[in-house]
Amino acid sequence: SATGTAPRADELTVRTWARPALAICLVVDRSGSMTGDRLAAAAVAAAAAAERAPEDFSVLAFSDKVMILKGQDQRRAIDDVVEDVFRLRGHGPTDLALALRVAKSQLASSTAQRKRVILLSDCRPTAGTEPERDAGGIDELHVIAPADDPADAEAFARAVGARFATLTGPSQIPAVFAQLAD
């Protein structure tokens, strides 16, 4: 100390810096085809992403524009994020390529060992460029499609080497997240 005496043990503070193991960017399709149970599942998925990577996650919603509901570096209460997802209304065209570019830019700020994009979408682009090119450079891409409309999403996942699962409803999110993480 400045007085020349050693500090007492109870006056010391120890800080450790650890690199997070996992960063997640949840990307939610809010185009016209994504309504009702699909958006409710997205809200549950936002809570699950926060549970799996509480210090390093983001949530995006997209149609032909991307809304950042929670940025990767932003501190925000998960209840507020989930509420924002519940407020989404499906409308507009689907620019999947733009959504993937924004997801990559969100994860670029993370120092996590693993960076994962979880895409909830039917993967039927109706605007923008070909999304396959923009999927390149994503460490781990997991595509979750509605069980009643999986064909385009499954073809996209296969084309880009992504993990793929279908979803029947919001209650299935924990099981699907666990299946994709294995």
Image (tube, rainbow, N blue to C red):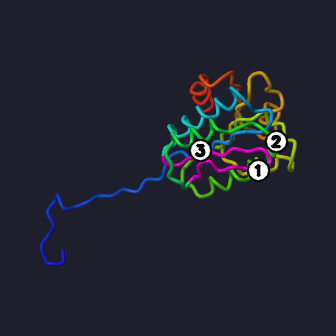
Q: Nearer the viewer, residue 38 or 128?
A: 38
Mark 3 vs mark 1, CA separation in Å: 20 Å
Q: Quadrant of residue 9?
A: bottom left
Instruction: Say which label, 1 or 2, has the lower sequence index.
Output: 1
Magenta part of the chain: 55-72
Q: Amino acid at mark 1?
A: Lys
Amino acid type assigned to the residue bearing label 3 in the image: Ile
Q: Label 1 belongs to which residue?
A: 65
Q: Are marks 3 and 2 in contact (CB under 8 Å)?
A: no
Name the spot of residue 75 as percent of width and height, x first: 50, 52
In the rendered image, which quarter contains the N terminus?
bottom left
Residue nearer the viewer, 154 or 94: 94
Q: Answer yes or no: do the residues labelled 1 and 2 have beta carbons within 8 Å?
A: yes
Rendered image: mark on residue 92: 2
Q: Is residue 37 above or below residue 60?
A: above
State the quadrant of the C terminus: top right
Residue at the spot of label 3 = 24
Name the N-terminal-most of marks 3 and 2.
3
Question: Residue 166 in the image: x percent, y percent?
Answer: 71, 25
**Category of crowding for the residue at label 1, using alpha-carbon neighbours closer than 10 angstroms: few (below 14), some (14–19), many (at least 20):** some
Q: Secondary structure at mark 3?
A: strand
Q: Residue at x 83, y 27 (%)?
A: 151
Q: Return the residue nearer the eye: 106 or 20.
A: 106
| Residue appearing at x 54%, y 55% in the figure | 73
**Magenta stretch: dominant SS?**
strand
Q: Secondary structure at mark 2?
A: loop
Picture disc at residue 127: none
Mark 3 vs 1, N-terminal side: 3
Identify whether 14 is placed above or below 79: below
Membership of 26 in magenta stretch: no
Label 2 is placed on what type of residue? Answer: Gly
Please give left or right for residue 157 compared with residue 52 in the image: right
